[in-house]
Amino acid sequence: MRAIELADVGRAYGERVALTGVTLAVEEGETLAVFGSNGAGKTTLLRILATLLRPHRGVARVLGRELPKEGWAVRGQVGFLGHEPLLYRDLTARENLRFHARLHGVPFERVELLLDAVGLHLRADDPVHTFSRGMVQRTAVCRAVLHSPALLLLDEPFAGLDPGAAAAVAPLLSGGTRVLISHDVDAGLAEADVVLGLRAGRVAFCERSADAADVRALYA
């Protein structure tokens, strides 16, 4: 089954076109790596796939469901890690993850396993607002993978993490079907089965393989 199918997908904010003419396909189990400078449309694309934004044109299918009309059937199967951690700052890490566990019908044992995996078990009962940026990011990663989603949508997942924390988090984000936004060209290409380059909301290239020089040119 194709995990993602987009045909001429576009989105605008008022008169400003954020994304236009995006057509691609990602098979189940593949990783789509998305590259582009700030404002290229990467986050807009991710938010459409996460059902957080409606496309204004074109056809979008995620996990076999058409968006937005079947978004209700997709949301519980998607793990989304964006710029915002989507955590309640006054709750502890454990309370945040247990809240999401209840939403997805996930046993609390899964919460404890994840907290231990990312090295937060000793701070699990501290409010999130007392955390460093890296600790917040680790908690957000736990939230995104808590329900073992069929599709992971990752916007700079290692942002704010030191090498040790990144190494702890990486196994939780590996495997399965993924969309990965990254400014680390070499690391992103190493993970990619499909490479999408965006420039000013338009597709610069969409290939099964891409040259690092072509990707870097997006940022020139």
Image (cartoon, helix red, strand yellow):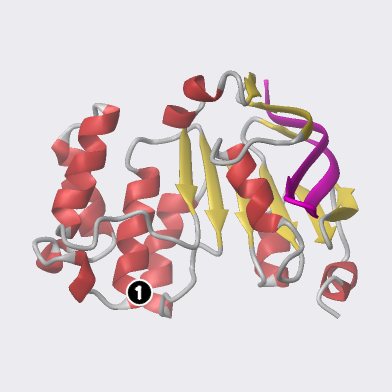
Whether 6 is among the magenta residues is yes
**Number of other residues with Cα within 10 Å of mark 1, as a class: few under 14, some 14 to 19, many 20 or more:** some
Most extreme residue toward the front, as rendered?
Answer: 14
- Based on the displayed image, in which of its 4 quarters is residue 140 positioned? bottom left
Whether 103 is among the magenta residues is no
Amino acid at dot 1:
Gly
Q: In this view, does 116 lie to the left or right of 150?
A: left
Could you say which is closer to the camera, residue 164 or residue 41?
A: 41
For mark 1, what is the residue? 134
- Based on the displayed image, in which of its 4 quarters is residue 184 positioned? bottom right
Q: In which quarter of the image is the N terminus?
A: top right
> Residue 137: x and y, percent?
37, 65
> Residue 103: x and y, percent?
26, 31
Q: Report the residue at 42% width, 29% height from top.
A: 76
SS class, disc 1: helix
Q: Is residue 67 left or right of residue 154?
A: right
Q: Report the residue at 60% width, 19% height from top.
A: 69
For the stretch drawn in magenta, what is the main secondary structure? strand
Q: Quadrant of the C terminus?
A: bottom right
Where are the magenta residues, as a range? Answer: 1-24
> Residue 126: x and y, percent?
11, 67
Q: Is residue 162 left or right of residue 179?
A: left
> Residue 33: x and y, percent?
70, 54
Q: Report the residue at 84% width, 70% height from top.
A: 212
77 w.r.t. 144: above or below: above
Q: Report the residue at 56% width, 35% height from top.
A: 51
Could you say which is closer to the camera, residue 192 or residue 136?
A: 136
